[in-house]
Image (spheres, rainbow, N blue to C red):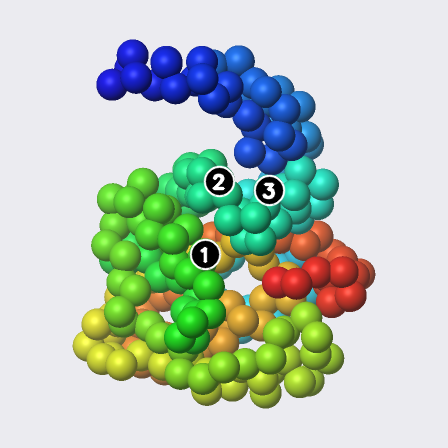
C-alpha cells in the first residue's frame, strides 16, 4: 500500500488542497499551515465572540479558527469546489479541540446541522468524520430538517429567527432524551442556526447540547459583513 501511494505521488504530485501549490510527499503546505496558525482562536476570544451571539440553548460552543483568509479559503473549497480531502483536515482539528474542551463532558453522540432533502451533505460528512475521530456514535437519524428555509445570511436578525423556527425536528425523542450531544458545523456566524438546533434538541429532552465548528466570525461587525459577502 505504501509503495502504491509512493508511485501515485510521483505520477500525481500532491498539491495543497487550499492554495494548489505542489508540496513535498508526506508534507503539508507550509504557507497554508502558517496562515492557519495565525487564525487560531483561544478560548477567551471564543467566549467573547459568543457573548454577542444568541446561544441561549447552547451549553458551550467552540471554534478552531477565525473565519478569515486561509480558514475561509479552506471552507469555501470544501463546500463549493467539493474537495473532499479537506474533510479530514477539518475534522482532525475539530475533534482535537472538542476532545480538549469537552473532556469530562461524557458526550453520548455527535450530530450535524441537518439539511433538507436534496440540500448538500457537507455538514453530514464533516460531523461523521469528527464522530469517528472521537469514537462517538454519529446520530444522524435522530435529528432532521423538515422544511426548506431561506439562506440565513440574506435575512435581517428578526427574520433569521422566524426563518428557522420549527425547521428542525427530532423524529424519536427517545434517541436524544437525557443525552449529552455535540453538534458539528463548519462555520458559526450569528449562531442563530445552532441555537435553533439546540432549542429543538432540548425540547425533545436532550440534557446538554455542545458545539464545535471549524471556524467562527470574530466580532459583531464580521457578522454584518458575512451577510453581504458569503454564501453560508
Ligand atoms: Zn497551501
Reading the image, the residue beneath label 1 is 122
Reading the image, the residue beneath label 2 is 86
* Left or right of residue 172: residue 55: right
Q: CA distance from mark 3 to mark 2?
A: 8 Å
Q: Is residue 43 visible?
A: no
Q: Are marks 1 and 2 in contact (CB under 8 Å)?
A: no
Label 1, residues with CA under 10 Å away: few <14, some 14-19, many ≥20: some
Label 2, residues with CA under 10 Å away: few <14, some 14-19, many ≥20: some
Looking at the image, which is closer to me, 198 or 189?
Answer: 189
Earlier residue among tags 3 and 1: 3
Q: Quadrant of residue 202?
A: bottom left
Earlier residue among tags 1 and 2: 2
Residue 127 vertical position relative to residue 85 in the rendered view, above or below: below
What number is the disc on residue 74?
Answer: 3
Label 3, residues with CA under 10 Å away: few <14, some 14-19, many ≥20: many
Q: At 41% across and 51% down in the image, what residue appears?
A: 126
Image quadrant holding the C terminus, namely: bottom right
Residue 11 vertical position relative to residue 141 in the rendered view, above or below: above
Amino acid at each position: 500500500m505504501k509503495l502504491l501511494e509512493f508511485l501515485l505521488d510521483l505520477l500525481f504530485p500532491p498539491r495543497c488542497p487550499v492554495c494548489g501549490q505542489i508540496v513535498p510527499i508526506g508534507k503539508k503546505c507550509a504557507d497554508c499551515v502558517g496562515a492557519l496558525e495565525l487564525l487560531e482562536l483561544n478560548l477567551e476570544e471564543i467566549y467573547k465572540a459568543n457573548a454577542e451571539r444568541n446561544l441561549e440553548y447552547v451549553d458551550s460552543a467552540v471554534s478552531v479558527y477565525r473565519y478569515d483568509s486561509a480558514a475561509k479559503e479552506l471552507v469555501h473549497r470544501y463546500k463549493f469546489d467539493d474537495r473532499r480531502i479537506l474533510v479530514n483536515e477539518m475534522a482532525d482539528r475539530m475533534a482535537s479541540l472538542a476532545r480538549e474542551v469537552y473532556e469530562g463532558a461524557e458526550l453520548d453522540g455527535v450530530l450535524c446541522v441537518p439539511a433538507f432533502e436534496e440540500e448538500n451533505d457537507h455538514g453530514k460528512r464533516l460531523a461523521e468524520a469528527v464522530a469517528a475521530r472521537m469514537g462517538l456514535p454519529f446520530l444522524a437519524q435522530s435529528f432532521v430538517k423538515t422544511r426548506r428555509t431561506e439562506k440565513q445570511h440574506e435575512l435581517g436578525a428578526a427574520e433569521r429567527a422566524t426563518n428557522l423556527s420549527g425547521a428542525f425536528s427530532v423524529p424519536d425523542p427517545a434517541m436524544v432524551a437525557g443525552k449529552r450531544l455535540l453538534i458539528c458545523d463548519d462555520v458559526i456566524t450569528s449562531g442563530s442556526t445552532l441555537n435553533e438546533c439546540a432549542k429543538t434538541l432540548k425540547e425533545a429532552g436532550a440534557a446538554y447540547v455542545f458545539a464545535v465548528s471549524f471556524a467562527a466570525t470574530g466580532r459583531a461587525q464580521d457578522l454584518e459583513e458575512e451577510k453581504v459577502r458569503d454564501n453560508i
